[in-house]
Each structure stands twice: as C-alpha cells, then as structure tokens.
C-alpha cells in the first residue's frame, strides 16, 4: 500500500520561499501567477499486511506528531 502526506504552511503563516518563487516567476514574465506556497510531500510505502483503517490512523498520527509542525503547518494524508 502506498500513501502520500502533504505538508504545507497554514495560510496565516508567512512563506518566504513561496514569495521568492513568485517574485522570480514575475521576473520571468509569468505575471498571471498571483501566489506560490511551498510545501513537502512524503511518499510512504506500507506493507500489505496492515488493514487500511489501521494504516490511515497510523499515518494521521505520524503526520501530526512527526512530519508536520501543527503550530504553523497543515497536512493531508492520501492512501492509495
């Protein structure tokens, strides 16, 4: 079973790297790009022995406790 955890800054948190990318895009003529937010993607492979409900619960815990800083980041878990 494969899963992805997407982690990004909350909308209320300043994203200087995203702003730098947006500025660079504008400098290259991409003026229609209004905002860029950067983030992280974790691709996780889980053994086929675990049931889906257990995997989803464990990945939620891992995302909340290890992969994301819940004070400034939000996350989303997708299991294939």
Image (cartoon, rainbow, N blue to C red):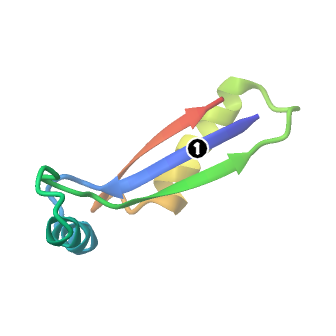
In the current view of this chain or complex, which residue is farthest to the front?
Answer: 29
In the image, residue 38 above or below residue 74: below
| Residue drawn at (24%, 54%) of the image | 10
Would you identify the image quadrant in which residue 38 lies? bottom left
4 horizontally vs 7: left or right: right
| Label 1 element class | strand
Looking at the rendered structure, the number of numbered marks drawn on it comes to 1
Q: Which residue is mark 1?
A: 4
In the image, residue 52 above or below residue 35: above
80 horizontally vs 45: left or right: left
- Residue 21 percent across, percent down from the top left: 26, 69
Would you identify the image quadrant in which residue 16 lies? bottom left
- Residue 15 percent across, percent down from the top left: 22, 67
Which of the two residues, 47 or 62, is positioned nearer the viewer here? 47
Which of the two residues, 46 or 17, is positioned nearer the viewer here? 17
| Residue drawn at (38%, 63%) of the image | 69
Name the image quarter holding the N terminus. top right
- Residue 5 percent across, percent down from the top left: 53, 47
| Residue drawn at (68%, 49%) of the image | 44
| Residue drawn at (14%, 56%) of the image | 12
In the image, residue 61 above or below residue 65: above
Name the image quarter holding the C terminus. top right
- Residue 72 percent across, percent down from the top left: 27, 62
Disc 1 packing (10 Å; few <14; some 14–19; many ≥20)? some
């Amino acid at each position: 079973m494969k899963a992805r955890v997407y982690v990004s800054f909350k909308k209320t948190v300043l994203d200087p790297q995203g702003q730098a990318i947006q500025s660079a895009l504008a400098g290259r003529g991409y003026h229609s790009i209004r905002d860029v937010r950067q983030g992280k993607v974790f691709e996780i492979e889980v053994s086929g022995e675990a049931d889906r409900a257990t995997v989803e619960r464990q990945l939620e815990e891992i995302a909340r406790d290890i992969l994301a800083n819940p004070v400034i980041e939000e996350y989303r878990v997708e299991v294939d």
